[in-house]
Image (cartoon, rainbow, N blue to C red):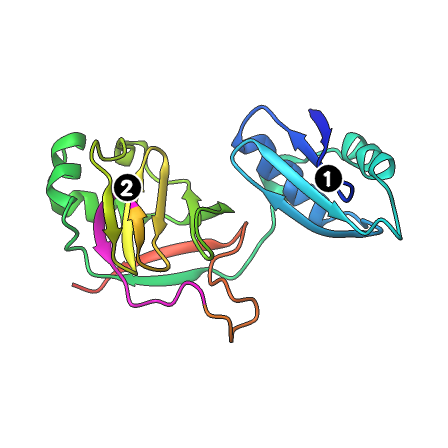
């Protein structure tokens, strides 16, 4: 683990890979963190924000170094989130071609397992989901779209995700959902938070 100051009220931990990030994130949520106001996981980093009136970077760094991740069992547990999907995405035929699978089997693989939100980013409410079958690992599109419609469900590398609003994007689109991923009137606004488990359901 490499620890770096991030402004005057945060410490950034650089780790080996996403699994190490998730293990540390889960362990930190089980730890009494005096003065810590937020813990933000990413692909290979973990940002710990703190209140300078209650603690300092040195104390946070000592906590990070002394925390012992316990593997997957230490990761946060949330009630599963079910997302209904119509699997009619423009890139579904391309995903079938890239994977060598029939389109129906692509859908079956996407819906048959429980995904986990590893981290969020790119846009408010956009969760990077991991844990899918390796056969669904496909590259991003060579020609990203200037507009991806709200609710589009996509694949890129080891991740799946749902676009919470219209935006540019380069993921392979396999379907669409009416689920609201980001709502400022909801607490929390994001439907998908780090550690949440997700099941996709084919609604035809």
The answer to if 181 sits in the magenta stretch is: yes
Up/down of 82 relative to 168, above or below: below
Give the SS element for disc 2: loop
> In the image, what residue occupies the spot 21% across and 31% down?
142
- Residue, disc 2: 171
Q: Where is residue 157 in the image (x, y as percent from the top left)?
A: 33, 33
Badge number at residue 153 = none
Q: How crowded is mark 2: few (under 14 residues within 10 Å), some or many (20 or more)?
A: many
Q: Is residue 106 found left or right of 78 in the rendered image?
A: left
Q: Which numbered disc, 2 or 1, marks the residue that appears first in the sequence?
A: 1
Q: Is residue 158 found left or right of 86 in the rendered image?
A: right
Residue 93 placement: quadrant = top left
Q: Is residue 69 found left or right of 162 in the rendered image?
A: right
Q: Residues within 10 Å of mark 1 (few under 14, many from 20)?
A: few
Q: How far apart are marks 2 and 1 (CA)?
A: 32 Å
> In the image, what residue occupies the spot 29% across and 68% down?
178
Q: Select label 2 or label 1 by which is in front.
A: 1
> In the image, what residue occupies the spot 85% across and 51% down?
34
Residue at the far bottom in the pictured view: 185
Q: What stretch is highlighted in magenta?
A: 169-182
Give the SS element for disc 1: loop
Q: Where is residue 125 in the image (x, y as percent from the top left)?
A: 46, 57
Q: The N terminus lies in which quarter of the figure?
A: top right
Nearer the observer, 131 or 45? 45
- Residue, disc 1: 7
Up/down of 122 relative to 165, above or below: above
Nearer the observer, 173 or 132? 173
């Amino acid at each position: 683990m490499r620890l770096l100051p991030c402004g005057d009220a945060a410490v950034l931990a650089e780790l080996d890979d996403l699994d190490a990030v998730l293990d540390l994130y889960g362990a930190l949520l089980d730890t009494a963190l005096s003065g810590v106001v937020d813990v933000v996981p990413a692909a290979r980093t973990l940002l710990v924000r703190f209140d300078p009136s209650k603690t300092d970077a040195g104390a946070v760094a000592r906590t990070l170094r002394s925390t012992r991740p316990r593997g997957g069992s230490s990761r946060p547990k949330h009630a599963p989130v079910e997302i209904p999907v119509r699997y009619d995405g423009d890139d579904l035929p391309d995903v079938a071609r890239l994977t060598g699978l029939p389109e129906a089997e692509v859908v079956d693989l996407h819906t048959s397992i429980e995904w986990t939100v590893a981290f969020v980013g790119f846009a408010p409410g956009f969760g990077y989901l991991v844990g899918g079958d390796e056969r669904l690992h496909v590259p991003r599109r060579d020609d990203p779209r200037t507009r991806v419609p709200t609710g589009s469900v996509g694949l890129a590398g080891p991740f799946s995700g749902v676009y919470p609003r219209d935006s540019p994007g380069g993921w392979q689109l396999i379907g669409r959902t009416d689920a609201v991923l980001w709502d400022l009137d909801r607490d929390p606004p994001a439907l998908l938070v780090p550690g949440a488990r997700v099941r996709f359901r084919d609604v035809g």
